[in-house]
Amino acid sequence: MDAIDALTSRRSAGQFTEPAPDEATLNEILRAAMRAPDHGKLRPWRFIVLRGDARKRFGDVCVEAMKRREPDAPANMLDREREKPLRAPLIVVLAAAIKEGKIPAVEQLLAAGAAAQNVMLAAHAMGYGAAWKTGAPAYDDFVKEALGLARTDQIVGFMYLGTPATVPPPLPAPPEFSTLVREWVG
Ligand SMILES: Cc1cc2nc3c(=O)[nH]c(=O)nc-3n(C[C@H](O)[C@H](O)[C@H](O)COP(=O)(O)O)c2cc1C
């Protein structure tokens, strides 16, 4: 797929089915992710791959985290939280390992965000569906610890990957340039 076509036709997948990208395809996706711009060449991105039963165990982690955040959470909310990681056959947790020093933390976070977008685009270009998810677990220290991340690391996204199970709605109308873009001439 042409690069501009990939950029302009990408949609988030609504629902997923098997197959997920295989090992070689996932490696290509991650190689593309790691070509994100990276001030200071810090390589702040970290990728944690969840598949198979690990997604179930991750669901249990998210439930435990929810119970700690919201001790009165009703059973149906906990059940929903447990099921979430099963929505795609493969999840890549994308985190930014923030280093103190000359490069501002926000720039390291942006570099990891750019890597996340590269995951979305590479998956799309190779015919797979992707969706970028966050929610409360992304900001939860219990979840980070369970994934082996440091508290100073930031989860940028849970990148859901697989085969789209539904036809996405048509692309939205092109944005109104005049409200978003202007030329400054001094
Ligand atoms: C930082 C970030 C966090 C996101 N978190 C979620 C999320 O938790 N749940 C979700 O359904 N989509 C999430 N999204 C995806 C956007 O909502 C999605 O791109 C949007 O619905 C537009 O759909 P499209 O990608 O098909 O254009 C997130 C996107 C970004 C950039």
Image (cartoon, rainbow, N blue to C red):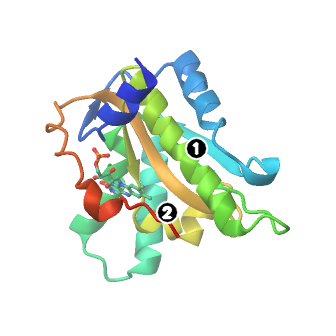
Q: Is residue 83 above or below residue 129?
A: below
Badge 2 residue CB within 8 Å of ligand 1: yes
Q: Check if mark 1's residue and mark 2's residue have beta carbons within 8 Å.
A: no
Residue 97: x and y, percent?
Answer: 71, 57
The secondary element bearing badge 1 is classed as: helix
Q: Is residue 103 visible?
A: yes
Q: Which mark is residue 3?
A: none
Q: Residue at x 23, y 41 (%)?
A: 14
Task: Report crowding for label 2: few under 14, some 14 to 19, many 20 or more residues within 10 A (C-alpha).
Answer: many
Q: Is residue 54 visible?
A: no
Q: Which mark is residue 115?
A: 1
Number of numbered discs visible in the structure rendering: 2
Give the label, 1 or 2, closer to the camera: 1
Q: Quadrant of residue 98?
A: bottom right
Residue 60: x and y, percent?
Answer: 44, 56
Residue bearing the label numbered 2: 138
Badge 1 residue CB within 8 Å of ligand 1: no
Q: Residue at x 18, y 35 (%)?
A: 168
The kind of residue on which mark 1 rests is Ala
Quarter of the figure with the N terminus: top left
The secondary element bearing badge 2 is classed as: helix
Q: Quadrant of residue 147?
A: bottom right
Residue 63: x and y, percent?
Answer: 41, 63
